[in-house]
């Protein structure tokens, strides 16, 4: 199994280190899966603050995976997708489609308000998921965990990320 170096960014104007349950969950699950969380941050919903943090992580040759949580819905404070999609070299269209399908099973038609997405930038895979812990758990258990497992077939992102230079 390939051990990946990861970064977790919580995007919120209200979360702190004391109440970032989704960030805590993601870091815990990454470690349980044998990966390492090298960076963790909480950013406000400012488009440029988000872009600054993630751009630095994309440029860091030691970071293979970035998982952001929060800011993927609709409204004036929901800037994650606008901040990060321009940074993608390639969009992983199926991630958002599958996340919304799985989310629909849990929350019904409210799933259409999730703009969850994923992409690749500088051989770094980036997952942008909603900020609720339930959404983080859904994304991790049903999609992200397997895609970061180098033994998952027929394909996974671990091989792409491990070649980052």
Image: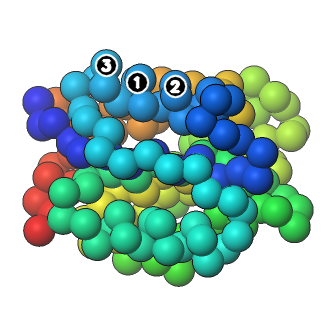
The residue to which callout 2 is attached is 25
Tag 1 secondary structure: helix
Most extreme residue toward the top, as rendered? 32
Tag 3 secondary structure: helix
Picture coordinates of residue 142 (x, y %)? 49, 28
Cα separation between marks 1 and 2: 6 Å
Picture coordinates of residue 131 (x, y %)? 68, 41
One can see residue 94 in this view: no
Q: Find residue 104 and report its image quarter.
A: top right
Q: Is residue 93 left or right of residue 28?
A: right
70 shown above or below 25: below
Q: At 88% across and 62% down in the image, what residue appears?
A: 75
44 shown above or below 165: above
Decide: marks 1, 3 in contact (CB < 8 A)? yes
The numbered mark at residue 32 is 3
Decide: marks 3, 2 in contact (CB < 8 A)? no
Q: Is residue 21 left or right of residue 12?
A: left
Few, some or many C-alpha atoms within 10 Å of disc 2 (few <14, some 14-19, many ≥20)?
Answer: some
Decide: marks 1, 2 in contact (CB < 8 A)? yes
Tag 2 secondary structure: helix
Q: How many marks?
A: 3
Quarter of the picture holding the N terminus: top left
The residue to which callout 1 is attached is 29
Q: At 77% across and 61% down in the image, what residue appears?
A: 78
């Amino acid at each position: 199994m390939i051990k990946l170096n990861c970064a977790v960014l919580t995007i919120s104007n209200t979360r702190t280190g004391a109440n970032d349950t989704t960030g805590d969950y993601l870091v815990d699950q990454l470690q349980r899966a044998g990966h390492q969380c090298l960076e963790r941050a909480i950013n406000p919903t400012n488009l440029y603050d988000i872009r600054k943090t993630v751009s630095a992580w994309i440029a860091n040759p030691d970071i293979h995976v970035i998982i952001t949580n929060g800011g993927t819905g609709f409204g004036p404070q929901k800037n994650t997708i606008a901040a990060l999609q321009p940074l993608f070299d390639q969009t992983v269209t199926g991630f958002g489609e599958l996340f919304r399908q799985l989310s629909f099973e849990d929350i019904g038609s409210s799933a259409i308000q999730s703009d969850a997405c994923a992409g690749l930038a500088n051989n770094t895979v980036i997952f942008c998921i909603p900020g609720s812990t339930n959404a983080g758990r859904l994304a991790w258990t049903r999609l992200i965990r397997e895609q970061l497992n180098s033994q998952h077939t027929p394909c996974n992102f671990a091989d792409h990320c491990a070649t980052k230079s």
